[in-house]
């Protein structure tokens, strides 16, 4: 991903900024380049720790661990935040030349995964389920009953857990920073509307970026 200072998050806040992005958009793309060629998979991840270093917990299903050669080399994790099409027809000053664009928030994370033991993987899976189940009206923990716990322990053998200590982050927060305030306000209004390219989450992100 090409670096652009205009769209880069504050370097001093980069780890926490990225951790928040992962928490809000935990379904990521995992990319590896083993000897057999490029391979990509899609799985949810959790933030295990942030602060000085971002660490993620995740898993892949067998045989994805073999396909990725998981743990043998560096991987790329792509986190896709809110994004959306921005029509130049929304810009208030029609006398100025303009083309449409796409606003988005994303981060590319790299590191070498550490494989988890079966026991650690089961605990990580349990935490993953709890993270999402707590938002439903009647949560069903992975080990909420003896039957569920036994079933979860059995099928977890079909997954391989990993911990990723992130060694490098490339992030982009492209929210119209290069546009006049009036143009940004007009774009936000359209994104908050009910048109074909409405994107409320992206609008909220742009509004927050304006301060």
Image (cartoon, helix red, strand yellow):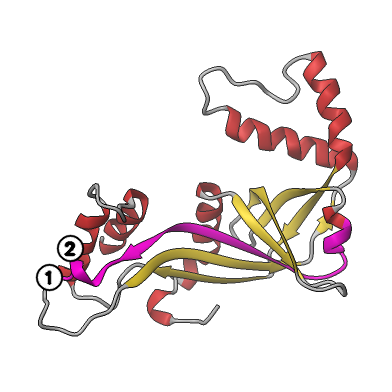
Residue at image position (64%, 30%) is: 130
Residue receiving disc 2: 186
Q: Residues at badges 2 and 1 in contact (C-beta under 8 Å)?
A: yes
Residue at far front of view: 196
Which circle's residue, 2 or 1, is located before the other in the chain?
1
Q: Quadrant of residue 9?
A: bottom left
Q: Which mark is residue 92?
A: 1
Report x, y in % for residue 163. Answer: 76, 54
Residue at image position (59%, 21%) is: 139
Residue at image position (60%, 55%) is: 50
Question: Which residue is more in the foreground, 148 or 63?
Answer: 63
Query: Is 68 contained in the magenta span?
Result: yes
Mark 1 surroundings within 10 Å by alpha-carbon count, few (fewer than 14), some (14 through 19), many (20 or more):
some
- Which residues make up the magenta segment? 66-92
23 relative position to 166: left or right: left
| Secondary structure found at label 2 | helix
| Secondary structure found at label 1 | loop
Query: Is 128 contained in the magenta span?
Result: no
Residue at image position (56%, 27%) is: 134
13 relative position to 161: left or right: left
Question: Which residue is more in the foreground, 89 or 131?
Answer: 89
Report x, y in % for residue 69. Answer: 87, 63
Report x, y in % for residue 7. Answer: 40, 74
């Amino acid at each position: 991903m090409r670096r652009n200072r205009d769209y880069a998050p504050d370097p001093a806040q980069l780890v926490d900024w990225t951790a928040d992005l992962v928490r809000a958009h935990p379904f990521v793309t995992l990319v590896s380049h083993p000897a057999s060629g490029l391979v990509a998979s899609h799985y949810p991840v959790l933030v295990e720790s942030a602060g000085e270093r971002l660490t993620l917990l995740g898993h892949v299903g067998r045989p994805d661990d073999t396909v990725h050669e998981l743990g043998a080399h560096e991987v790329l994790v792509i986190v896709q935040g809110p994004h959306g099409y921005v029509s130049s027809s929304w810009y208030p000053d029609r006398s100025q030349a303009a083309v449409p664009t796409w606003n988005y928030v994303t981060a590319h994370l790299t590191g070498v995964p550490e494989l988890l033991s079966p026991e650690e993987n089961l605990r990580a899976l349990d935490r993953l389920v709890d993270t999402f189940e707590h938002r439903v009206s009647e949560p069903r923990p992975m080990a909420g009953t003896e039957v569920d716990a036994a079933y979860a322990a059995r099928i977890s053998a079909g997954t391989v857990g990993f911990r990723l200590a992130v060694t490098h982050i490339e992030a982009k927060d492209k929210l119209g920073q290069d546009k006049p305030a009036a143009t940004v306000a007009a774009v936000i209004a359209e994104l908050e509307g009910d048109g074909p390219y409405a994107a409320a989450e992206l609008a909220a992100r742009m509004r927050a970026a304006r301060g």
